[in-house]
Amino acid sequence: MTLLASFAHEDAALDAARALREKGVAGVDLYSPIPLHGAEEALGLGKSLVRVFTLLGGILGAIGGFTLCVWTATRFILPTAGRPVITLPPYLLITYESTILLGTLMTLLGFFVVARLPAWRDRTYRASSNVDRFVISVAGPGAAEAEDILRAAGAESIERESAS
Amino acid sequence: MSIGVFEAARSVIKGLIIAVLAIIGAYIGHWAHGAILNDYTPVQPIEFSHEVHAGENEIPCEYCHSWAGRSATAGVPSVETCVGCHKGLTEVRDKPDVVKLFDYWERGEGIPWVKVHDTPDFVHFRHKPHIRGGVECQTCHGPVEEMARVTRRVDLNENLRMPWCIDCHTEEDVANGRDCLTCHY
Amino acid sequence: MSTIRDKLREYRTAGYYTEFEYHWTMAVDLDRCTGCEACVVACQAENNLPIVGEKLMRQGREMKWLRIERYWDGEYPNARLNFIPMLCQHCDEAPCEIACPVFATYHNQDGLNAQVYNRCIGTRTCAVYCPYEVRFFNWFTYTWDEPLEQQLNPDVTVREKGVMEKCTFCVQRINRAKDLARDEDRRVADGEAQPACAQACPTDAIVFGDRNDPESAVSRKLEDPRAYSVLEELNTHPSVVYLKNARKPLAGGADDDHHGDESDSRASREGARPTWERGHDPRSGPALREGETPSLQTQQADTVA
Amino acid sequence: MLSRRDIFKYLAGGGVGVGTGLLLGEVNQRPLETLLSTHIPPEDFAPGMDTWYNTLCRMCPAGCGISVRVREGRAKKIEGNPGHPVNRGGTCSLGQASLNALYNPDRLRSPMRSDGEGGFVESSWDEALEAIAPRLGAMQSAGMGGRTWILTGGFLSSGEEALDKFGEALGANILRLGLDTPATELAAAKAMYGFSGLPHYDIGSADLVVSFGADFLGAWRSPVGYSKAYGEFRQGGDGHRGYLVQIEPRMSLTGVNADEWLPARPGTEGALALALAADLLGRSGPDAASVGWEDLPGALSLDEAAALADLPAERLRELAERLATAKAPLVLGGGAAGAGANATETLTCVAALNRVLDAAGTTVRPNLAHAPRYSALSEIEEFVAGAANGEVSLVIVAGVDPLHDLPDSLGLRGALDRAELVVALDSFPSDTASAADWILATDTFFETWDDDISLPGTGKLSVTLQQPVQKRLYDTLSVTDIVLRLAQRSGGALAEALPYQDAEAYTRSEWAAAWTNLGIQDDFDAGFRQVQQQGVWVADLAEGMADQFSDDAPAPAAPSGPQFAGDASEYPFVLHPFQTPGLREGKGARLPWIQELPDPQTSVAYGSWVELNPSTADELDLRDGDVVEVSSQAGAVNAPVLRYPGVRPDVIAMPLGQGHQANGRYAQGRGVNPASLLAARSDDITGALAWAATRVALRKTGERVRMTKTSGVSRTLGRQILGPDDEH
Amino acid sequence: MSATRELMFDHGQPSYSEVNNDVINALTTTTWRYWVTLVISAGTALLFFVAPWIYQIIVGVGAAGMNRNAMWGTYLSNFIFWIGLSHSGTLLSAVLHITQSDWRKSIYRSAEAMTLFSLMTAAMFVMVHVGRVWFVHWTFPFPNPMELWPNFRSPLMFDVMAILTYLTASSVFIYMGSLPDFAAVRDRSTGLRRRIYAVMCFGWRGTAHEWHTLGWAYTFFAVLVIPLAVSVHSIVSWDFAMSTVPGLHHTIFAPYFVCGAIYSGTAGIVTVMWMLRKFMGFGRYIGQLHIDNLSKLLLVLSLIWTYINICENFSGWYSGTSFEYEAILYRVWEGPFWWLYWEMILFCAVVPLVLFSRRIRTNWNVMLVISILINIGMLTERFVIVASSLPRKFLPDVFGTYFPSLVEISITVGSFAIFTTLFLLFVKIFPAVSIYEVKETLNPLRKREAHT
């Protein structure tokens, strides 16, 4: 069973979330039409893991780009313009670009992985939460005791969605 | 109420799978065409059998393709060369293809053989250095002496494409073997 | 491990492949060059250069791997015209070579600046980067009016539209000479490989040969104090070296230095034999063989192999 | 999850893919090519290998030896024959391009008959010979051979001799035509050296060459041979560097390469040469006495000559000084200087200068004594008059194109129109051939037998053999073949005079006869085979083959002043027609490589232009590309202006060779022909056409064209392209 | 804070749901005018770009006016122009995101779309430019049995890599930023559109966790894209500067090109914003503040651009070498394109000086004219650089001229149609104004503030 409480004001919703957290209610999530400053703190979200992906992507890109240049240049040696086969300045440029390319792609991957997208069917989602309502969902055993707290925080409406 | 991604995308995903399968299929088809099915055996104006001439009768290649060791091109024998032997071979004189040969001879025409092994115009393959380097005719042309009708056997020479040339040049450590200007100019 | 280190050191050596097996070099004596343009037509004949027609020529799209440049000096009546043949300089540090994204142009082990037609995708960057403007682009697929195409050199590829091309130092002749030399297990002799322009030149202004051979004619030319490279300041290290015209400068004073202090040239003239008697056959192909008569009955054929 | 329908769909997708792949593979296959075997291969047939044949280049009378590269029965490339004494392995642009003549798309492929309306229909040799031979036979038997005129050129070959024999047996008249003939030079050599023939000029061993108008590096006589020598002259092995002075109103290719270019007023060259000779004679040199002249009557002083020629006097004095101190000087005369109204006098003075310099006998050498005869203007007039009176029944034009090359003012077109039957022997529908009743398609020189004695000579006896390098491309015959067949068909004296089967048999018999004449003991067949291989037969001049120079010629008279057709007030400029190395008199125009070849000095291709001195152009407010009308007494042409710093302000120069009315797609209607401007003026002594003696006027038409010109800016703009600046 | 917020909306703040309605309605309700415009624009693209291109592929690049001197021409200068135009999106979305300039939020989506589409158009010009477009894949490092790889030493390969990266990063950037808005569109639609947007938004729900991750990822993107954008146009400039050609071989080219790129991109944004206001009814979201800020940016960029231009000419003049001096002289005075040079100076250096006036800065119609003039100037700048330098390199004998042919002019015109077509498609697929970020700039829905 999931409890869905809809709020018209972001501070009310954040207060509710904070209150739930203080009570130690688990399974709380906050749906909002805009990113809410304070939600991280209210829901206890730390620094995102995405940055690890970005870093990894960058490193991978740098190594990959440089390796690509060196490896391809030494497969079929075609000297040009009296330059050495491994020419650093141009290869560093390629390395730079591939760093960013892989960094970008890995960030995208990280985003999907960390945000757990694409999402499966979500019965607790209400379209209004993408317009102007802030919805707090409480799933699992905490739902019963959460209802009071949510009402106290000023929820406009509260509905129950039976778990699927 | 939300709508799930995969639920929404079911038909799209199906379509994608079909598309991916089609692309993979196309690759397989193309590869198969080049790698398995593409033994190229054109019909020649005269059913000349290398099996009989080179195989059973053990005529050396360079008896007819006399320029292979001296020139860029191996050369096909002139009608005169064919007739030169066949004049004396009265026992096969009545075979239909021999009759054809003598028709050409009497009309004073050359025989328009169909090229089996061919390289593009921007490749300057030269027979001489290969023969001088000890490459067997069969290395590129296959066991011609076993062929009734000459075939470009794809398993032997990958349709005479560049990777195959390069591999051999690399393995044999040919002088300037990996220089583009050796073949392309 | 050490091999990897060796390889790396090799790959990191600047001027990789400056140690050429042959270093084909051309010396053009501007004092001998009369600007007659025999070389230009010889090049056109040898290398299957198309006839582009008047319209395209007016648009500046002529295909001449070798051209004569002309520079006037002074005004009438003290005007003077100078010629300089300009062709691919086969620079050791060629700006064009770094430009190509697909390695269609590179430097080979003979010191040639190679252009691989079938690899070219036609970005034309090499032509933009070339300070000598000796790279030519096939704006169209050129055709020959029947039966002019029968003249085409079978040893040279006919290029299609969208492909860059340029002087190759007649690499087909070089390859032929190297082939012959390899059969006899020797190096290519001086004068054995001659590009069409050098062979045609009626004043012997163009000398071609291997710079690595100190005895070659071209090596001797390089020692001439008049030797210089065009646009030397660009540091391209061309393989085409020019010998400056020895005419006295126009504006300069009376010129007696070439004249007054000569030894008895009439005597030396007596001893001089014409060059054709000194005997050197620059033809790259096999000569008419002994006891052979030219024949009329050459077979007509589409492709004869 | 996976329904059966889905599985079918997936399978179908994969199947379509495989099919597409197979199809792609099939489409991507290289096209089928055939490999045609030979029937009976020629003994020297070598697929994929070059065969080289030494033969003769017939693009100009220089007679260079060439080696033709033949692959699979097709001529591919021309190189100079290194063993040939004329060109010593060199070639010129025209020679290189001569393959374009062989494979020209507009070459005649069979005999053509005029349809009477300006067009031609294909015919056969039988028909063609049948149309001509009976007429010849009739004329022969009626003794009216004089009603036949043969128009030909000036080669010294067995082929020409066949024509000669033919004309002689028939009693026909022969006209030897050409614009730039050596007639005046021959006359001068005869007068001054007592030598019948053209002397051999040894430029290679000279240390000072003074050339009066002779563009020996461009288009004069034997450009390749002289260029070879010029290479030696410039940077010879012994370290000496010759000094070249060019005296001419328009800077030719030789003028470009000269150390000094002196733009003398046209027609004053003779006076200049004589003044120099007189000045040298005045100096007490050891050589002066040997000439046998005390002084030269009528010679101007250097200052007077300089004033006459419009040159700075000190330059002339410098030149005299140079001549006096030179160890091996050589003076040449020719080109426009040999084509004025006073041409023979001019060249005689030049030859006199050579004698004074003691060059005659050293740098000017005896040569094979042959004096080709060229028709004087009076003979052409005779032909024209005869045609006007209806006395010309048959005209045979063999390999020349007088309607293009010679001035319209001679009236040749009208004469050909009035002749009963005109037969042209040509490989191309040239201007003249297009005006004929029959064109008999001839071989190019790659397809037939002939020989040639080089016109300018080599100081040796050398005969170049011309042999076929490949099978005939079309149904053509050589001029000799046609003459032989005509003779045989006509019967009578003609058949007796020329009893040969074909050109090969004729050439061989001529050579065999020469062999006998020269008293050579060797086996002829072996010797001839050797000549076939070498392409040329060379021997030192034997006694009697060359007249020795005589020392007893009288001192030359002062040349008459320059005279021109046209009044100076009405026609203010002197027309200076010149030949470019590629186009020459017009033979190069049909060769696409030559059309596309930028002119050496101006870089103009595909067309004609009018060269003007920049100061003249400024005066007339003309810029490059402004079309002007150039008019003379004889006619007018329109061509774009090109400002050229190397031409006198009172001279305008135009290239010859373009302006064909026919001659195939590359030549037809391209440019203009300055020959049509030339007045019918002849040299006073020899009667040869004086093609540099016409005055013209300029008129701006207001039209402007963009010339096909490859050069952008012809100044170095301070860039060091021509080498580092000298320190001194 | 609230004062700025008020400034951002000329006609008062909309409510949250109004934002959703306005933006999504603009996306879903399509008038016949839109279709007519789309057909005209696509037709123009087909007629002026695709048709001449196919013709050019069949006959060869000779259909263009390039010649032996000017081997590069309009195609390459257009390529640079379009790459330059693409720099707007990066500037607005990345630079201003990092500097937390809130006014960017209503306009950055379209700016990013500009980036994407002008990059695509630029990439098209690469294809149009090369001689054998059917082999253009050889510039990509894909494994092949011949072991033949691209030459990574070539400035063109830098280009390939840079554009590839930039295109990837830009598309990822705009797409990821649009996810929440796709979800909003999904929620308001039914049937097939709902299915499509459901897939496109990857099931976005707007949970705190998703917002949190998006925020992080987005910031990283912004950080990655800024140096990328700078490098892309530097690299494009090195196509020129790495050559020896006088007039192209300038060390200042990288900053010059980057500055010019941002300049023309910003001008492009002004044009596009005017269109969005006029035709899409976004006047409520894009107002005085935006145009004022954009104009100030333009003014600053114009001054920098002018400065670098002067530097370039000065160094050419002061270098004293004949090559450089001649090249500059030819460009500004002697060549056939001197008037184009001065037109460029007029449009890009002189005209923007009027932006010192606030009245002009805030007048949308005047700004439209100025922005178009600036872009015409920047288009000609690239053309002048190519067309006045390449025909005159080192050897005077081969000096020539270059004039674009009809095919080139037509393809140039057609490229604008291609861009327009792509943009027209964009406004019907993407919410052209970022819904959630506009909401962020509204007064927050707070109980406390509402009560106090």
Image (cartoon, coloured by chain):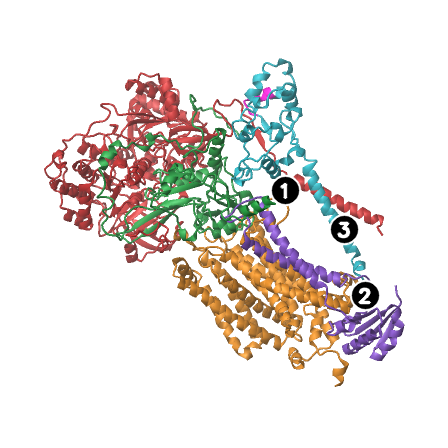
Check residue E145 in the rendering and tell me which mark sits there, or answer none: 1
The letter of the red chain is D
Chain ID for label 1? E
Q: CA distance from mark 3 to mark 2?
A: 25 Å
Chain ID for label 2? B
Name chain B's colour.
cyan
Q: Is residue D72 visible?
A: no
Location of residue D519 by image quarter: top left
Q: For numbered disc 2, what is the local secondary structure?
A: loop
E409 inside magenta stretch? no
- Provide residue B166's location: percent of width, then percent of height: 59, 38
Name chain C's colour.
green
The letter of the purple chain is A
Pick out the residue farthest to the front: C2
Q: Which residue is mark 2?
A: B2
For marks 1 and 3, give the one nearer the viewer: 1
Which residues are drawn in magenta? B101-110
Amino acid type at image mark 1: Pro
Q: Is residue D465 above or below residue E263?
A: above
Judge from the rendering whether residue B170 lies leftward or rightward of residue B13; answer left or right: left
Name chain E's colour.
orange
**Magenta-highlighted stretch: main secondary structure?**
helix
Q: For numbered disc 3, what is the local secondary structure?
A: helix
